[in-house]
Image (cartoon, rainbow, N blue to C red):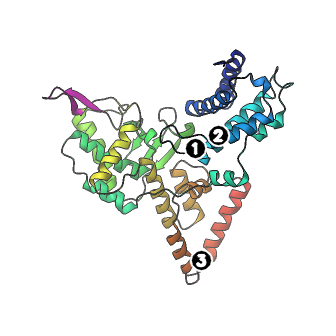
Amino acid sequence: MQKHCPDNERIKREYRKFLKHAHGRSEASLDMTAKAIDRFEQYAHHRNFKEFCRQQAIGFCEHLADQKNERNGNALSRGTQHATLAALRSFFHWLARESGYKSRIAYHDADYFSLSERDGRIARTRLAKAYPSLEQVQDVIRSMLPANAVQLRDRAVVAFILLTGARDGATRTIRLKHLDVGRGVLHQDAREVATKLGKSFDSYFLPVGEDVRKIVEDWVIYLEREHGFGPDDVLFPAARQELGPDGLLCAAGLSREGWATAAPIRQIFKTAFTAAGLPYHSPHRIRDTLATLGNELCRNGKAMKAWTLNLGHAHPLTMFANYGPIDSAEQGEIMRKMGIATPPTDAALDQVQELLDKLRLGG
């Protein structure tokens, strides 16, 4: 049995370049696509892609449904199956237009890379993820009693993410010059900050408690006065490592370097939530907390738009669809109150209608 096909390797490299340079796909996305194609190649015993036909696609779908997750041994989730088949469908659609392949591959045969209607619907279903309440995050922050510079930094990290809604990937790359504590705004400049999709935007401090804001402000002052940090220094430096009495590396104050990944920020959250007696919630779940707060505080279309922009989304529906889900009990409570709630004013209705009109027109 052949281990690889030279023609396949060449065209896979071309497809990777196409996705990267023509569509701007990230390395993570490229790797996911490569894994999907490798799965198919292994199933097809590395036959030349020019031999592809719909029967192969149908057989692979059945084969994929029987595969196990390498980490836990469970059946592959429908979400994983859906993503794998979608990547293959796109690849063979592209291949069917390429010279040397378009006379060999029927374009619509790639459509056979698909789940059943029922399984596809399950794969696309978004399940609500648990997230902490605002009060719980505030309690976590207040329970973090720093005894040294590293612990002081850790408390400031949690407070900063609650105050600004910044993603952990962006947080590790923030520098002092990006934070204007006087105006209460974080400038997420994509040229220097690792924002999602390379978008630049301003995040104004959110109303999550004056004590939370003061922790962040005091942290900036501490870095500037006690460590001589300037505008180009990172807001959250990594710990300086030294050999301890036992001969092992341990934290010994702050360095001037930032973190290489966001993993240390997630560890800070895990340690803080566990110490406070709460289940671990990742930094990203704080965005659900803030979306829920926005749903409670925003009374008109403009407020909704401003809150959404603060989280880095251009479209309010992104926040509604992806963050701050409500559970069944809350849904029932809302529905019960609808019949007795005070009717909205004409002005409020006008503002909601204005927002809907803008969304419909793409404004």
Assign a secondary structure to mark 2: helix
Query: Which residue position holds label 2?
Result: 64
- Viewer-side residue, 233 vs 284: 284
Query: Which mark is first along the chain, 1 or 2?
Result: 2
Horizontal side of 71 relative to 277 (left or right) equals right
Magenta residues span: 238-253
| Tally of marks | 3
Helix, strand, or loop for circle 3?
loop
Q: Can you name the residue that lies furthest to the front here?
A: 1
The single residue placed furthest to the bottom in the displayed view is 340
Please say if the residues under marks 2 and 1 sit with CB atoms less than 8 Å apart: yes
Task: Give the residue drawn at x 25%, y 55%.
Answer: 143
Horizontal and vertical percent position of residue 300: 57, 66
Residue 7, horizontal then vertical, whole percent: 72, 17
In which quadrant of the rendered image does the N terminus lie?
A: top right
Residue 357 in the figure: left or right of residue 129: right
Q: Amino acid at mark 1?
A: Leu
| Separation of residues labelled 1 and 3 (CA atoms) | 47 Å
Write down the residue under mark 3.
Answer: 344
Residue type at mark 2? Answer: Leu
Give the Cα distance between marks 2 and 1: 8 Å
Q: Which residue is mark 1?
A: 76
Secondary structure mostly seen in the magenta stretch: strand
Q: Residues within 10 Å of mark 2 (few under 14, many from 20)?
A: some
